[in-house]
Amino acid sequence: MIRYLKRGRDVQARAQDDTAVRNTVEGIIRDIETRGDAAVREYSKKFDNWDPQDFRLSDAAIERAMKSLSARELEDIRFAQAQVRNFAQIQRDSMLDVKWKRAPACSSAIAMCRSTRWAATSPAASIRCWPRRI
């Protein structure tokens, strides 16, 4: 017989939690958009217990922080930065609009070609459309 030590929350409870988190985050973002740096300072104190005189670090402070890290920590940070930049670039590239002209033989298969960036094929009519960047 199976004995459960701990059961997960049901779907409805998880959905409620997700909604609560989303509402909280959206509220924080709205507050920062509205009140700017004052809101950032307030959340910094609240969440991180950090209330510096200035949120901008001087070159000397950055240099001190860099020197306090091991080679492995610096390598890990650089790796994480590269991963974030790579993902952001891929995401950004996927959001670009693509303009294209249809080939003359493509008019009867235009519906198939509208929703893709790649070559679309109509098996019934053997028509191929290749989107072209303008």
Image (cartoon, grey):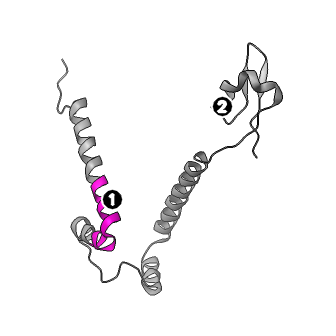
Magenta segment main secondary structure: helix
Compared to 70, does 128 lie above or below?
A: above
State which region is magenta: 26-41
Please tell me which residue is depicted at 62% across the width and 31% down the height of the picture: 115
N-term mark: 1 or 2? 1
Q: Who is closer to the viewer here, 109 or 50?
A: 109
C-alpha gap between disc 1 and disc 2 = 36 Å
Q: Nearer the viewer, mark 1 or mark 2?
A: 2
- Across and down, in percent, residue 124 comes to 74, 12
Residue 114 shows which numbered tag? Answer: 2
Query: Magenta stretch: residue 78 in it?
Result: no
- Across and down, in percent, residue 74 comes to 49, 68
- Across and down, in percent, residue 103 comes to 81, 31
- Across and down, in percent, residue 96 comes to 61, 48
Of all residues, the one furthest to the top in this rendering is 124
Compared to 12, does 72 lie above or below?
A: below
Q: Amino acid at mark 2?
A: Arg
Query: Magenta stretch: residue 38 in it?
Result: yes
Q: Which residue is mark 1?
A: 29
> Element at badge 1?
helix
Please tell me which residue is depicted at 47% across the width and 82% down the height of the picture: 63
